[in-house]
Image (spheres, rainbow, N blue to C red):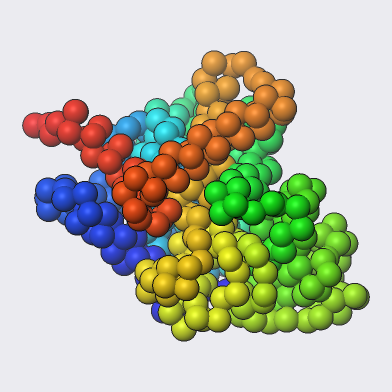
Amino acid sequence: MTNATINLYDTAVTQLRDVGAALRLEPGIVELLSHCSRELTVSIPVRMDDGSLRTFTGHRMQHNAVRGPTKGGIRYHPAVTADEVRGLAMLMTWKCAVVDTPYGGAKGGITVDPKQLSRGELERLTRRYTYELGDFIGPDRDIPAPDVNTDGQVMAWMLDTYSVLHGVTTPAVVTGKPVHLGGTLGRIEATGRGVMIAAQEAARHAGLQTDGLRVVVQGMGNVGGIAARLMAAEGFVVVGMCDSKSGVHNPAGLDVAAVTAYQREHRALAGFPGAAAVTVAGLLELPCDVLVPAAVEGQITAANAPRIQARIVVEGANGPTTPDADLVLLDRGIMVVPDILANAGGVFVSYLEWVQDLQRFFWAEAEVNERLTQGMRQAFAAVAAAAAERNVTLRQAAMQLAVTRVVEAMTSRGLYP
């Protein structure tokens, strides 16, 4: 599903410059925020199971730390580039600000296909990457989390490596780790749950009843798969789903649990009974009320935006809609709930996990979910109010709100020296 022609960093800078013009920011401020404050690219040597030595390239980019330590996931994917990580780090700054968590944005990644690695090779890759990051990360500096093709086990290896290197167990250095190592209940479902809440709020904002609204979800990972399950449980009718290779469609509704179980067993959706096959590209153009692109960036472009049939797009992925496509969707009257709001549930609950680790006191899952629900609803309400007041789109309002919060913090702190 990767669109190699889309440069996420260029997209993020374009969005920032538009916001800077709208807010009449000093050009120097916009220029400063167009760059990451710190960047680290490392070579990662790994001894493979067959005895050979391979070297991988890893990145960790910290965009802005004016509101607090930086925060962001780490992805393992063959398409990872420095510009992709830069763009994602910038988006994380806005995402943390729009839900008002005391973080700046960061992102990390390794250019690798983890499906080609054994468990031992994956562990050695992760531990050496963590070693190479050194003091670039830390509970008061930069806190990684899972992202594409990484999970709680990867975070556990990072936690252990960092703790061994520093001589003290440090649970707060990463989030998204297993509960028995200081992770929080509710973290695995957090991003998908946040997407579901964003869809509910968007529907209400549009004057729609959520019961019976048709949903198409692109992606079946921890965002798309969980969002589909939770949305179905809340009365939405999921009519289309896909993984990275193929999709299925049933206008009467899919049994999300059955689709998920079939994909898990067969590693593909081809042949799923009781539904029509559809391509990944074709899935985005299915008739529906709510479209949730929850895979990777650059999926809705100027080329396919004229054929999108949804009334609302809820961006579960980071950067799934290009700026040109945004204009097409706006012209067609399609509401877009932007990524920095729609998928902020993960970083919000990561913040809750970090707080619990720092105070060594943990909450019940119901309390975590309630805090998430409240936080997402407050953030959506603030963005919707700003959109109405300024007569702009939800994306423009979210970006303007986030950038304003960051610039206010920068202005208050000033420059040193």
Give the residue displayed 52% in from the left and 72% down from the top. Answer: 299
Taking depth in this image into account, of 386 and 135 the one nearest to the observer is: 386
Q: Is residue 251 left or right of residue 390?
A: right
Give the residue displayed 30% in from the left and 45% down from the top. Answer: 403
> In x, y percent, where is residue 51?
61, 64
> In x, y percent, where is residue 376?
55, 38
> In x, y percent, where is residue 106?
39, 46
User: Residue 34 sits in which quadrant?
Assistant: bottom left
Q: Is residue 131 visible?
A: no
User: Considering the image in quadrants, where does the N terminus appear?
Assistant: bottom right
Give the residue displayed 67% in from the left and 76% down from the top. Answer: 286
Question: Please, which residue is most extreme toward the right here?
Answer: 273
| Above/below status of 248 relative to 90 | below
Give the residue displayed 50% in from the left and 42% down from the top. Answer: 380
| Above/below status of 144 relative to 3 | above
Question: Please, which residue is most extreme toward the front here?
Answer: 207
Q: Is residue 148 left or right of residue 363?
A: left
| Above/below status of 288 relative to 285 | above
